[in-house]
Image (cartoon, rainbow, N blue to C red):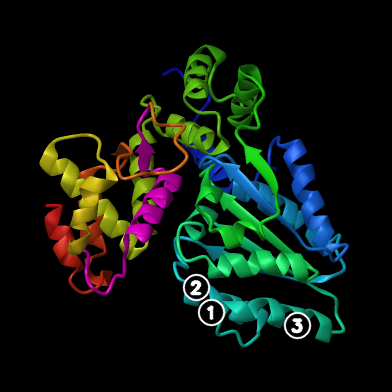
Amino acid sequence: MKVKQLDENKINRLISKIDSGQDELYGYDEEKKILENVLNKTFKNGESSSVIIYGCRGSGKTCLLDHCLKKKVTSSSRRRTIIKLDGAIHNTDALALSVIAQCVDIPVTNASQIGTALQEKISSSKTIKTFCFILNEIDIFCRRQQTLLYTLFDAVHYVPGICLIGLTAKADCTDYVEKRVRSRMSYQTIVLSSPFKNQKEYFDYVKNYLEGAFSDSILKPLVFRQYKKSRTPGDMKKFMLDLLLSCDSLTASKSLTNDRKVQLLESLSFLELAVVCLISKKLSDSGKTFFRPIEIAPLLRNIPAQISHSKELFLFVLHRLIDYGLLFINPGQRYNSYISDWTSLSLNADLELLKFVLNKNKKDLPTNFLHVLETTA
């Protein structure tokens, strides 16, 4: 690959630029207006409102929300409390309630008490307060006991100053809600697909972001191929990162790639690291380059007992590993919005590199984690 004036320092700077995501959220102008209007109703006017943001992973749901929330910090005079709940982590009403009680500083022991407690909290204070509930992976909340979901939508109806925002990659998530919840649900919808209107806009963005590191003759066919696979900002950033780390003409490229992956593997939680080990073991034994979650699920019993896990957490970890760039959804399934048991995935981590990381940090691993290490040998 012929690269003009691309040295190790420039690679490092561009990689840091991509990883840190310092750039302003690109595009989605209409979507920004809709979400800002929803937030204005609560933070400025004290009205209650709700919105569900749909979009496949990497489409920019969280970035859009963070952008609009930060914009409202200085423009609103009301005191606000943001409560973030995640369907994969807060997998029971009890866990979600404990988070709410801690954030709002109210004694809540039952989901039915939330609306009353919030109303008392808002009316008894001299300072005007608002509450923003963010439900990440709201589709998981819609698939189980829905008392909490019912209570929050009910509070939006009867308690002023509450904003409920749901984030999901599953377009049919509301198909699973109970009749009682459906009767309380009243929300706006924001659908994200891609902020890029056409191929040229996509190419210009990548070229400017990489600061002319690659010539048009090299970059165009690669970018156009990626555009056909996926146009989401998340996948675009992974593409640019892989492009920078695959410059074989650079002497520092291979070591830089390995160094970055070592740091990434060392930063994983024990559960994430254990799942990577299990996937490596499965791929090594089968001789395949891809796997499906249903093939790994039975191996979860090899994870040390002190590391809690469940099927929901396992799928959540797979999504996280995709975000980190350690897993890839195989071509042909790129537009699937939700990882199922049969989704085809590939691991982007060398087995020898994984062994190096595990041996290097052996003394810091939990008891019995070495059993997971042995299964990858």
Using the image, determine if residue 314 lies above or below residue 115.
Answer: above
314 in the magenta segment:
yes
Could you tell me which quadrant the N terminus lies in? Answer: top left
- Dot placed on the residue nearer the N-terminal end, 1 or 2: 2
Q: Secondary structure at mark 1?
A: helix
Looking at the picture, tell me which residue is in the foreground, 203 or 68: 68
**Mark 3: amino acid:** Lys
Residue drawn where x is 85% and y is 80% of the image: 127
Please provide the residue range marked out in magenta.
Answer: 303-331
Label 3 to label 2: alpha-carbon separation: 21 Å
Label 1 to label 3: alpha-carbon separation: 17 Å
Q: Which residue is mark 3?
A: 121
- Dot placed on the residue nearer the N-terminal end, 1 or 3: 1
Q: Secondary structure at mark 2?
A: helix
Looking at the picture, tell me which residue is in the foreground, 305 or 142: 142
Residue drawn where x is 61% and y is 78% of the image: 112
Residue drawn where x is 11% and y is 43% of the image: 285
Q: Is residue 111 left or right of residue 252?
A: right
Q: Is residue 169 left or right of residue 36?
A: left
Quadrant of the image occupied by residue 25? top right
Residue drawn where x is 37% and y is 50% of the image: 318
Circles 1 and 2: CB atoms closer than 8 Å: no
**Mark 1: amino acid:** Ser
Residue 263 appears anywhere in the view: no
Label 1 to label 2: alpha-carbon separation: 9 Å
Using the image, determine if residue 44 lies above or below residue 241.
Answer: below
- Dot placed on the residue nearer the N-terminal end, 3 or 2: 2
Q: Which residue is mark 2?
A: 93
Circles 3 and 2: CB atoms closer than 8 Å: no
Using the image, determine if residue 182 lies above or below residue 325.
Answer: below
Looking at the picture, tell me which residue is in the foreground, 342 or 59: 342
Quadrant of the image occupied by residue 365? bottom left
